[in-house]
Amino acid sequence: MKFINTLSALLLASLMASTTATAQQDKDLEPALAAAAEINQSAATSQSKINTITDQIDNKLQQFKTINKEIEGLLVYNNQLKKQIANQDQEMLDLNAAIDEVSVIERQITPLMIRMIDGLGQFVELDMPFLPEERANRIIDLRNMMDRADVAPSEKFRRVMEAYQVEMDYGRTLESYPGLQLIDGQERNVDFLRIGRTALIYQTRDASKQGIWNKQTRQWEELSSDYRTQVTKGLRMAKKQMAPDLLMLPVAITD
C-alpha cells in the first residue's frame, strides 16, 4: 500500500514537471509563432500586390495591343488619304489647266459667234421673205444675247446653233401661215404657202388672187388662176387637212 502511494506521488510529480516544461516551451515558441504569423501576413499582402500588379500588366498589355492595331489602321488610312490628296492635287492642276483653256476658247468663240450671227442675218435678208418678223426678231434676240453677261458662253453658242438649225429645217418642210400682202396697191389678208425653199406663194382668203415670189427678180408676181386649185390643195396639205400629194406649181430656175 505504501508502495502504491509512493508511485502515485512520483507520477503526479512527473506530470507536474512535464506540464511545467510544456508551458515553458509554449512560452518560448510564442515569439516564433508570432513572427511566422507576421511573415505569413506579409507574404499574403505581397502576393495580393503581385496579383494586382499582374492584372495591371495584363490590362496594359491588352491596351498596348489594341493601340497597336489602331495605329496600324491609322497608318493604312493615312496612306489612303495621301493617295486621295495626291489625286485631288492632280485634279486641281487639270482643272486649272482646263479653266485656262476655256478662257482661251471663250475669247476665240465669241468673235466666231458674232460672225455666225452676222452671216445668219445676211442669209435671212437674201432668202425668200417668209416669216419676216419672226426671223428678224430671232436675229435681234441673238445680238442682244451676246451683250448679256448673265448668259454663259455655252448657252450663247447653243442658241446660235439652234437658230441655224431652225433655218435649215425651213428647207425641208411644208408650211402655211396667215399674213398681209400688198395686192394692186392694197394690203389684203392672205395665206402664205412655203414649200421648203423651193417656192413661196400667197393666196387671198377668197382664193381670187394668188402670187409667187420670183427669186431672180426678188419680186412678187401674180400667179395664173390656173394654179388656184393646186395652191388651195397645197394650203390644205400644209394645214394637215389632207394627206400629202403631188402639187403642180411653177418653180423658178436659179443659176
Image (cartoon, grey):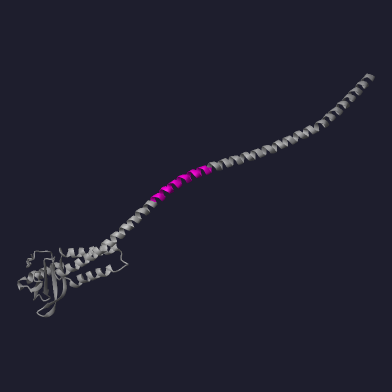
Where the C terminus falls, by quadrant? bottom left
Q: Residue 52 location, x and y as percent? A: 64, 40
- In the rendered view, does 36 fall on the left or right side of 231? right
Examine the structure image and report whether residue 54 is included in the region drawn in magenta: no
Front residue of 169/77: it is: 77
The residue positioned 21% from the left and 67% from the top of the image is 118
Asked which quadrant contains residue 2, the reply is top right
The answer to whether residue 180 is above or below residue 248 is below
What range is drawn magenta here? 66-87
The residue positioned 26% from the left and 70% from the top of the image is 144
The residue positioned 25% from the left and 69% from the top of the image is 143
Question: Is residue 153 visible to the viewer in this orientation of the structure?
Answer: yes
Q: Residue 136 location, x and y as percent? A: 20, 71
The answer to whether residue 89 is above or below residue 52 is below
Give the main secondary structure, helix, strand or loop, of the magenta stretch.
helix
- In the rendered view, does 62 fall on the left or right side of 50? left
Front residue of 86/157: it is: 86
Question: Is residue 1 visible to the viewer in this orientation of the structure?
Answer: no
Asked which quadrant contains residue 134, the reply is bottom left
Where the N terminus falls, by quadrant? top right
Front residue of 89/59: it is: 89
Q: Residue 99 location, x and y as percent? A: 33, 58
**Residue projecting furthest to the right:** 2
The answer to whether residue 194 is above or below residue 32 is below
The residue positioned 78% from the left and 32% from the top of the image is 32
**Residue projecting furthest to the bottom:** 186
Examine the structure image and report whether residue 68 is included in the region drawn in magenta: yes
Front residue of 179/16: it is: 179
- In the rendered view, does 75 fall on the left or right side of 169? right
Count of marks placed on residues: 0
